[in-house]
């Protein structure tokens, strides 16, 4: 007997009281029948009309947008961006909230994830519950900091550049992105016709005047003549291998942090907020307190940001091993740290390379894993190395909380946790946790 098709609830509207903020840039509400709604474009404590955007009658939860605010929160402001709101650009989550409220919401999410996934209270994590703004981001209510030094534009069928709608491949054409850094906005990406392109990555380095665009043509399309408002290096994504290849100009940009210059190859990772790299290096080094002669690991090391900071501080008698899976990032890291004789960068996945090194003891560890976290197996290995302190840099509080639980099982406790709002107007938040071994007998 064939099962009856499930009834879609997309387009249905519910008047709801909005509950707490949840991880992902939405708030929790319930229908009168008790079905859970994850609602965007609202704030805790509001009463709204929520229109379902995804979900079926028997689903565990529904996704929805607040299309009408019946009772507004005192934290609500009018979104300064004309492209923010239901069904429009998906790049920001909290344009409608005061900056201080955004940081408070992010703190509530971190606290909830720590409690639910690691069984830790803020006090047990050595955290005062605050999310600190990046330097220069303390702005009046509703004002938008132009912080994003890397913007990935999508291109619609008419050749207009824009940003994707939330959980959609549809493109919202824009004339200007308010959170784009001046160096990106000055390129004038939104002004020209990009017919034949699928996407454009625009990069404005903060450590130099380097500007770069990475073009991804649609299948069979020819690369256009690129004429932008500022001098720029141009790269393209090859259809055959997905690799990034130089068209003209430098195949990298130069960034600066902790008084060092770092080469970052096209498509390589660097923190998007102009203050982020220095903010994170400072937090990590203050937490680790490196000593001359220390042996340190920098895992998921990228182009060598933390390895460079560690090498400066452990000195000629110390040593640093960095491990990174990306081939181009490893090349950049080796170039960036070539002046340190006792720094070694190995290519490969951390879980595969680290056991092969034969290292059984280290003094310090920095790990900055991808969004999914390091995982149980890697954390177990790190816990066996006897590090005096470990710094965990996390872009996802859920993954951080899970891994902190694994570290606890391995004999480590969280000494201190700091959180930074390096992605204003979005739900993303960066954390630095400092761990140390649990004292024997405690």
Image (tube, rainbow, N blue to C red):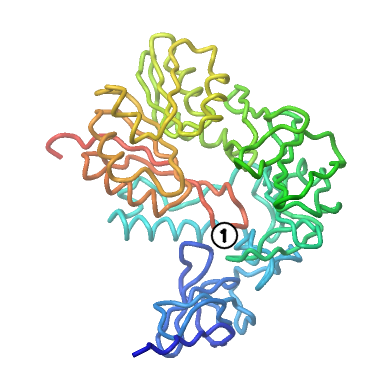
Q: How many discs mark residues in the rendered view?
A: 1
Classify residue 240 as left or right of residue 159: left
Residue 55 place in picture, x, y as percent: 49, 79
Q: Nearer the viewer, residue 160 or 75?
A: 160
Q: Quadrant of residue 34?
A: bottom left
At 55% from the left and 78% from the top, the residue drawn is: 46
Q: Which residue matches tag 1?
A: 102
Query: Residue at left 81%, top 43%?
Result: 187
Identify the element where label 1 is drawn: helix
Residue 242 sits in which quadrant?
top right
Circle 1 residues within 10 Å: few <14, some 14–19, many ≥20: many
Is any atom of residue 352 visible in this view?
yes
Instruction: Measuring from the top left, give residue 402's x and y in whole percent.
Output: 33, 51
Q: Is residue 223 above or below residue 77?
A: above
As drawn, is 324 to the left or to the right of 201?
A: left
User: Image height check: is 264 above or below 42?
Assistant: above
Q: Position of residue 408 (x, y in %)?
A: 24, 44
Q: Where is the C terminus found, in terms of image quarters?
A: top left
Measured as percent of width and height from the top left, residue 411 is found at 21, 39
Q: Is residue 304 above or below residue 213?
A: above
Q: Is residue 2 above or below residue 391?
A: below
- The answer to whether residue 179 of the structure is visible from this angle is no
Q: What residue lies at 33% left-to-right and 90% top-to-bottom? A: 1
Quadrant of residue 61 in the image?
Answer: bottom left
């Amino acid at each position: 007997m064939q099962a009856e098709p499930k009834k879609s609830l997309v387009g249905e509207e519910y008047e709801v009281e909005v509950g707490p903020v949840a991880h992902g840039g939405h708030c929790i509400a319930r229908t009168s029948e008790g079905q859970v709604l994850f609602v965007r474009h609202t704030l805790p404590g509001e009463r709204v009309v929520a229109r379902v955007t995804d979900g079926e009658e028997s689903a565990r939860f529904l996704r929805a947008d607040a299309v009408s605010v019946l009772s507004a929160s005192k934290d609500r402001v009018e979104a300064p961006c004309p492209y923010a709101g239901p069904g429009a650009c998906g790049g920001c989550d909290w344009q409608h909230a005061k900056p201080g409220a955004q940081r408070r919401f992010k703190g509530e999410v971190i606290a909830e994830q720590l409690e639910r996934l690691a069984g830790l209270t803020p006090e047990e994590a050595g955290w005062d519950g605050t999310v600190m703004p990046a330097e220069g981001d303390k702005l009046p209510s509703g004002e938008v900091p132009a912080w994003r030094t890397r913007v990935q534009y999508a291109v619609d069928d008419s050749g207009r550049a824009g940003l994707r709608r939330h959980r959609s491949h549809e493109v919202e054409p824009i004339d200007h992105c308010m959170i784009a850094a001046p160096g990106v906005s000055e390129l004038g990406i939104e002004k020209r016709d990009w017919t034949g392109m699928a996407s454009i990555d625009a990069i404005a380095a903060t450590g130099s005047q380097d500007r770069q665009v990475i073009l991804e043509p649609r299948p069979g399309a020819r690369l256009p003549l690129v004429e932008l408002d500022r001098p720029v290096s141009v790269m393209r994504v090859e259809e055959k291998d997905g690799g990034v290849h130089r068209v003209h100009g430098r195949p990298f940009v130069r960034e600066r942090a902790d008084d060092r210059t770092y080469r970052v190859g096209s498509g390589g990772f660097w923190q998007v907020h102009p203050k982020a790299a220095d903010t994170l290096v400072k937090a990590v080094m203050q937490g680790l307190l490196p000593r001359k002669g220390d042996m340190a690991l920098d895992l998921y090391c990228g182009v060598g940001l933390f390895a460079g900071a560690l090498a400066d501080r452990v000195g000629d008698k110390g040593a640093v091993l960095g491990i990174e899976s990306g081939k181009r990032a490893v090349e950049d890291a080796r170039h960036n740290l070539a002046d340190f004789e006792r720094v070694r960068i190995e290519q490969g996945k951390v879980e595969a390379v680290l056991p092969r090194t034969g290292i059984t003891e280290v003094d310090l560890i920095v790990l900055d894993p991808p969004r999914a976290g390091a995982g149980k197996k890697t954390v177990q290995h790190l816990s066996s190395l006897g590090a005096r302190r470990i710094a965990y840099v996390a872009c996802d509080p859920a993954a951080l909380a899970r891994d902190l639980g694994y570290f606890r099982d391995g004999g480590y406790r969280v000494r201190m946790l700091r959180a930074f709002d390096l992605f204003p107007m979005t739900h993303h938040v960066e954390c630095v946790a400092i761990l140390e071994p649990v004292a024997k007998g405690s």
